Image (tube, grey):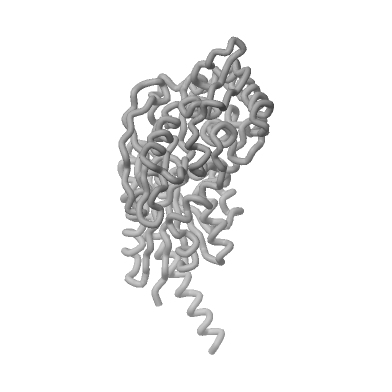
Amino acid sequence: MNIRVLVAPSGFKGCLDPEHVASAIATGLRRASDAVEVRELALVDGGEGTAATLARVTDGELRPARVTGPLGEVLDTSFAMLGGTHHGTAVVELAAAAGLSHVPHDRRDPMRTTTRGVGALILAALDAGATRVIVGCGDSGVNDGGAGLAQALGVRLLDRSGEDIVGGGLGLAELDRIDLAGRDPRLARVPMEVACNVENVLTGPRGVARVFGPQKGASEDDVRTMEAALDRFAAVVERDCGVDVRLMPGGGASGGAGAGLHALVGGTLRSRFDLLFAFHGVDEAVAWADLIVTAEGGLDYKSVRGKIPSEMGRRGATAGKAVVVLAGTLGERSGEVLDEGVCAYFSVIGRPQSLDDAMRDVEEQLGRSAEQMMRTFLAGVALGRRQNSGSQA
């Protein structure tokens, strides 16, 4: 009897995209036994690679666009126009215009980086005839509450002198009034859905400045300054737009871009997995599988907050399926993923080595770890069958 295995990983950031991670795992699984039937799904979460992956799985295409990057530089990037039954749907990946990967380490300052280029990508999608726009949040290098993208779409964010505030999160501290009159009218006709981590909120102890600011280059003083600026932004948004975005689920996605996309642009915030997994047929694939193998570059306490391994754990547990996670590294409180429906987790690093060497060898190590995991699983299946036959005798 064949064992049906669903391989559904995320990418290993800075190392392997989801397709290559899935392929490496599948290769190892097949080495373990001819009785293993593998199905591969390369999953995305709204961050880097989302537009390209969805274009590929729907027979769509990437469209080039020249926009403003997070530091105000000219940036050649792209958005996706999907194909097949999703014809007319555009996918704008926030990271394509405001991703942390576009900001050199020595210039990372989330108080000054902007999402203006994201707004330009949305305009390009509308110009291309999009009848639906999906904005993927993740892997950002910004903390401007979506102010820059809103300005690019015609929203005016004004200081006390009636002048447009400067770009970046720091400018939010000077915000006095919001004027929506010049917003692109197409936004009222074309539905926009924002694929975001609904665990992320804008302000408070779990707000984006405190949780993600340091990852984007913010000092402790910067974090306090950004918190005050985002508090000001939220207060003016509530007064002028009638929306309280402070603790809105997903409002803190991508440095608060979720809040801006909803309150200033009219986007609907949705769980990124509910929205994006539908393109892959994840639920049908979970129902098909006997075993689910997912993967992430680093597994730690953050993995239970809206990351792919925990999401696959929950979906697998609901369907009564075993879920195993392969990870590049195991960090602080990585075991918390077991509370999310995951049965077991392993690091694929099999020997002491430098980070550079581990990243270079990751495909080989994924394959080897997948093979050994599968052999262990099959041994358990064989033992279970032997025990069952003995009890029946």
Q: Residue furthest top?
A: 161
At a point 55% along the width and 47% down the height, the residue shown is 271
How many circles with numbers are drawn on the protein?
Answer: 0
Depth check, front residue: 87 or 143: 87
Residue 124 on image: x %, y %: 38, 35
Q: Quadrant of the N terminus?
A: bottom left
Depth check, front residue: 130 or 222: 130
The correct choice, above or below, for 49 with respect to 24 in the image is above
Residue 231 falls in image quadrant: top right
Residue 241 on image: x %, y %: 64, 30
Depth check, front residue: 378 or 149: 149
From this viewpoint, is residue 114 visible? yes
The correct choice, above or below, for 195 with respect to 227 in the image is below
From this viewpoint, is residue 215 visible? no
Residue 283 on image: x %, y %: 50, 61
Residue 208 falls in image quadrant: top right
At a point 38% along the width and 42% down the height, the residue shown is 129
At a point 62% along the width and 36% down the height, the residue shown is 201
The correct choice, above or below, for 72 with respect to 286 in the image is above
Depth check, front residue: 387 or 314: 314
Residue 191 on image: x %, y %: 51, 44
